[in-house]
Structure formats: structure tokens, C-alpha cells
Image (cartoon, coloured by chain):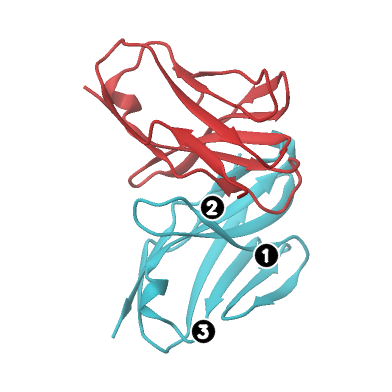
Chain colours: A red, B cyan
Amino acid sequence: EAQVTQNPRYLITVTGKKLTVTCSQNMNHEYMSWYRQDPGLGLRQIYYSMNVEVTDKGDVPEGYKVSRKEKRNFPLILESPSPNQTSLYFCASSGQASAYEQYFGPGTRLTVT
Amino acid sequence: GQNIDQPTEMTATEGAIVQINCTYQTSGFNGLFWYQQHAGEAPTFLSYNVLDGLEEKGRFSSFLSRSKGYSYLLLKELQMKDSASYLCAVRDLNSGYALNFGKGTSLLVTP
């Protein structure tokens, strides 16, 4: 089944404790992206990747890192999480950047206390 | 940058037709998308417009006017399961093909 998977789905952590949210797709997609969704603000792009070893900042990259060592994986790293990073995070992928549909993962609900 | 506006909330009756509007401003327009999102779930793709005109897909249609920076999503024969948030998104080729989302329109379908 073609899908985008994220782990963990739910996470409660404390300020400053490094964490990684994994994202994997099995569709051989080139383009992958991370979003956060907050009430009243909608979906905002954090980072995106056009292909392996090619990443760039989105609208809200501060406090986040990403890597794209393999085509299928695009982990999101929070080196020192803070409470303002409490949010719902979505990973998405598409065949190419110009493709007409992005497939979203199920989301990761992160709470930083 | 982007400025994407859509109404915050709408209510409609089961079986009726509802139109959700979206206006945008962008420097590198490369397509307009509509997504549906049920509470707590991932957005799912509904439609894509890159040329002016109407795209029809079953009960859902989407219209685009690039000169006016305007789109709408039309939902016909509303069903209770259509209660969801509808997200308008514009792709900007000047920002690495980034997909920029509006804040979403929460649609409530009542019996």
C-alpha cells in the first residue's frame, strides 16, 4: 500500500530533550516536506527536500533540522525542543515538486512541557 | 510571500450546495489546491487547478481565475460526512514549489 508513515504518532517530552520524528514514504517520491499545524494559523511549511541531499527552509524553520540521506526517509530533528514547538506535525511527499498532489502522513502530535 | 484568505466557518444543510471561496496573492503562481481535513486527521487531496476554469470531480468542483487571484470549491448534495475543514493552498515556484496553505474553512453540515 502506497503511504507516508510517521513515528511516533504521539509524544510528550520536556524542554531541551532532543527528539527525532521519522517520516518514510514507499512511493519513490522525490519531494518531501514537513509542516506544522496550529489552531488559527493553519499548516505552515518547516523544511522541504527536492531530492536526496537537497533540503531547504520553509516558512518556519527555526528550532528544527532535517536530513535527506535516502530517498524514502526525511526525519525532523528538534535539537532542543521548547514549549512553542508543541504542535501537530505532518510529513508529506509527492513524485516531484511540480506534481499535482502531495500525500500526507497521519501526523505526529507533539507536546513539549 | 503569500496571502491566502478563506472564510473561517460555514454552515450548510444536508443535501444543499455550498461554495467556499479563496483569494490569494502570489508572485510565482504554480497551481491552486483544495484539501479536505477531518479533525485530527491528515489532509486529503480534493482538487488541483492551474488553468482558468472549472474542474469537476463527482460532487466536488473547483474554479480558478488567475487574473482575479480567486478560486472556489463547490460541494453539491452535501452529506454529513462532508463536515470537515477545507484548505486552500497555492504553490509558489519562486519558493521551491512550496505549498502555502490558507487557515482553512470549517464546514458544518446540519441535518
- Amino acid at circle 1: Lys
Foreground mark, 2 or 1? 2
Q: Which mark is residue A20?
A: none
- Would residue A59 be seen by someone viewing this image from the given angle? no
Task: From this view, report whether residue B8 is shown above or below residue A61.
Answer: below
The chain that hosts pointer 1 is B
Q: Name the residue under label 2.
A: B4
Residue pictured at 70% horizontal, 28% vertical: A71
Q: How far apart, in angstroms, are the residues tagged by discs 2 and 3?
A: 24 Å
Residue drawn 72% across and 62% down?
A: B66
Nearest the viewer among B18 and A109 is A109
For residue A52, what is the image quadrant?
top right
Of residues A81 and B52, the one drawn nearer to the viewer in this rendering: A81
Label 3: how many Cα within 10 Å (few below 14, some 14–19, many 20+): some
Q: Name the foreground residue: B2 vs B104.
A: B104
Q: Is residue B77 above or below residue B70?
A: below
Q: Earlier in the sequence, mark 3 or mark 1?
A: 1
Percent of width and height locating residue B36? 49, 61
Q: Which mark is residue B68?
A: 1
Q: What's the residue type where badge 3 is placed?
A: Lys
Choose the circle earlier in sequence order: 2 or 1.
2
Q: In whole angstroms, how far apart are the C-alphas of marks 2 and 1? A: 13 Å
Dot 2: within a 10 Å radius of its alpha carbon, few (fewer than 14), some, or many (20 or more) residues? Answer: many
Q: What residue type is labelled 2?
A: Ile
Q: Nearer the viewer, mark 2 or mark 3?
A: 3
